[in-house]
Amino acid sequence: MQIPSNISTGLFLSELVIGFLISILVLFYGVSFLKAYAKRKDWNDSFVIIVNLIWFFLNISFKFIFLYFLGAGFTLSIISDLIVILITIGISSIIVSKSANKEFIESSILIISFQAMLYALGFLLRITNDVVRLMVTSEKDDVYSAGLALFLIMLIIVGINGFFINWGNKAQFLTNKNTIIMITIIPGFYYLAHIFELKEAAFIQGFFTHLVWGVVITIIVSIIVKILAQSNLAFDQYRDINILEKNQKLLEVRNLKVYYPLIGGMLKRQFGSVKAVDGVTFNINTGETVGLVGESGCGKTTIAKAILGLVPKEAGEIIFNGEPIPNDYAKFLRQKIQIVFQDPDASLNPRMKVVNIIAEPLRNLLGITKKEEIRRRVLKLLDEVSLKREHMDRFPHEFSGGQKQRIIIARALASNPELIILDEPTSALDVSVQAQILNLLKALQKTYGYGFLFITHNLAVVNHIADRVAVMYLGKFVEVGETDQIFSNTTHPYSQALLASRTELDPSDKEIKFVIKGEVPSPIAPPSGCTFNPRCISDARTKECMRKTPHKITIEEGHYIWCVNPPVWMQKKALEQKESETLVYDN
């Protein structure tokens, strides 16, 4: 192989090796970039490896050809990069459109952004290589110090540019911010590297001047890129609070399981798990309130966390508006599913005014940044929860418990939700205030058709607000039905025990009528068979309860229990029906 006369053998080999190593680094980064993009868009990622390998072989082949025939200067020129980029864009766009079943234009947009990222990373690596080589090969000792000063300036510029790109309320809506940061620092770095090559050791004398110019060039480019990127963002236009059509299926939970791993030992290995939720199924319609009741630790709040994407699912599906909720919770779901927490004091930032607390969903989910628009929307939301204009600029400590809970409700309504999870919203409030909050929630639901998942211990509250009730024990449902069915025809022994143990205001009777015996079993090692059998006092309890798993029993339409043996009255009814059939047969 004949090496061109304008390139020495050492330079030729070093350029070839360095170009190969840079291409390897860029290849791995490109694979992760395309995989992340395909996952975010729910695309088939079969094209990821193919596209990156095509880029890799084209890049290496053309660099070798340009280096061998045209010299090192052309190898590092923009023209050679453009040739490789244009060829790769054409081939890769066709592959992506075929593999992912997407339009050619949509595929081309992906590949163009992909090539811009690869070019930026490769360019930065080549600049770094040139500076390091000049530092090492120069005979002047001061050149090494000047090179370190250059890298310090570059590091400062990266930090300043990263802060600027991430600054502002709309910046959080930008995707691939790391790629934007990488691309926008190229002009500043190119300018600094050029000055360093010209001045070498004298570069360090103008340290602050070079720093200022590098920052100015980078920020100007970042402003332009940021404006262009934000102009293409599709912010959700804020509408008046939605009025939902009633009795439409909103949320469907199928066989949901959530396990918490138990880690221990020197090697921190998992030796078991806590089955917080172990196969529950239910649904919520628009305009409907589903009450979730049970003792502490039975898994009620874990269900809420799983719906909100705060804890991972072990198994099962959570379907919202006909679409499964993915593990990577989308901004749209954050907007449509909101929660009202139990403790209003812990839910409010004491250093923020009410207007800023309620405005957070407007900024973070809907992209509203104009101060006048925010205050107008916040005022309307406060009016929905019966608060006034003068409350906008107060801090949380200036409000009562009921008013704080109203503020939290207003914040939940700010993003135009469809499903609101209420995690014991009245447990920390006085009885009179509880009635106000419950009436407020019912009025909002009647007007706008929200779906509510109401988690509570207070059975009187459930009876007042819920349309359907699910009774939960140790991670599983034991009884589900309409509110009237649960309270007038309570069937499962645990549900009967809960209702019998509730306290009522009766001056003539001050004794507690019923207390559920025993302690809740450990969810780490629950009892075999029916988990409630050690505490069950039902007449239908048998030895089979210790061995068999409870199964679903229909009491009436819409009313179900999970039990090993049917209740006594159902057994008597079945026996009477069998005797009557036998009598008719004998006659």
Image (tube, rainbow, N blue to C red):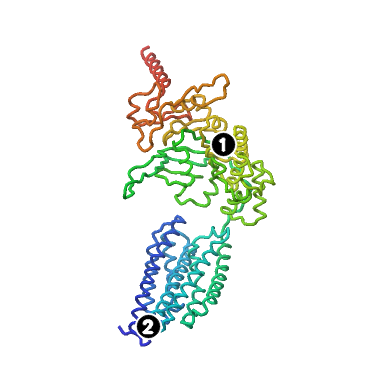
The quadrant of the image that shows the C terminus is: top left
- Decide which of 456, 200 is in the foreground and name it: 200
Within 10 Å of disc 1 (Cα), the crowding (few <14, some 14-19, many 20+) is many
* Left or right position of 71 against 196: left
In the rendered structure, which disc, 2 or 1, sits on the residue that comes first in sequence? 2
Q: In this view, does 180 lie above or below 6?
A: above
Cβ atoms at labels 2 and 1 below 8 Å apart:
no
Q: In x, y percent, where is residue 472?
A: 45, 33
Closest to the observer, 100 or 470: 470
Quadrant in the rendering for residue 168: bottom right
Q: In this view, does 432 lie above or below 369?
A: above
Kindly identify the residue that appears in the image at 47 percent across and 44 percent down: 305
Q: Which secondary structure, mark 1?
A: loop
Question: Tag 2: Cα neighbours inside 10 Å, few (<14), some, or many (≥20)?
Answer: few
Q: In this view, does 27 lie above or below 129?
A: above
Percent position (x, y) of residue 438?
A: 60, 35
Residue under pointer 1: 426
User: Which x, y percent locates residue 295?
Assistant: 46, 33
Q: Give the number of the mark in front: 2 or 1.
A: 1
Task: Tell me if 85 is positioned left or right of 362 in this view.
Answer: left
Q: Residue furthest bottom?
A: 5
Where residue 569 is drawn, which disc sits there? none
Amino acid marked by disc 2: Phe
Image quadrant where one finds the N terminus:
bottom left
Q: Mark 2 points at which residue?
A: 69
Q: Residue furthest top?
A: 587
Secondary element under disc 2, as helix, strand or loop, is: helix
**Residue 281 image position (x, y, % from top left):** 44, 37
- The amino acid pointed to by label 1 is Thr
Measure how far apart labels 2 and 1 are at the Cα level. Answer: 79 Å
Q: In this view, does 219 lie to the left or right of 95?
A: right
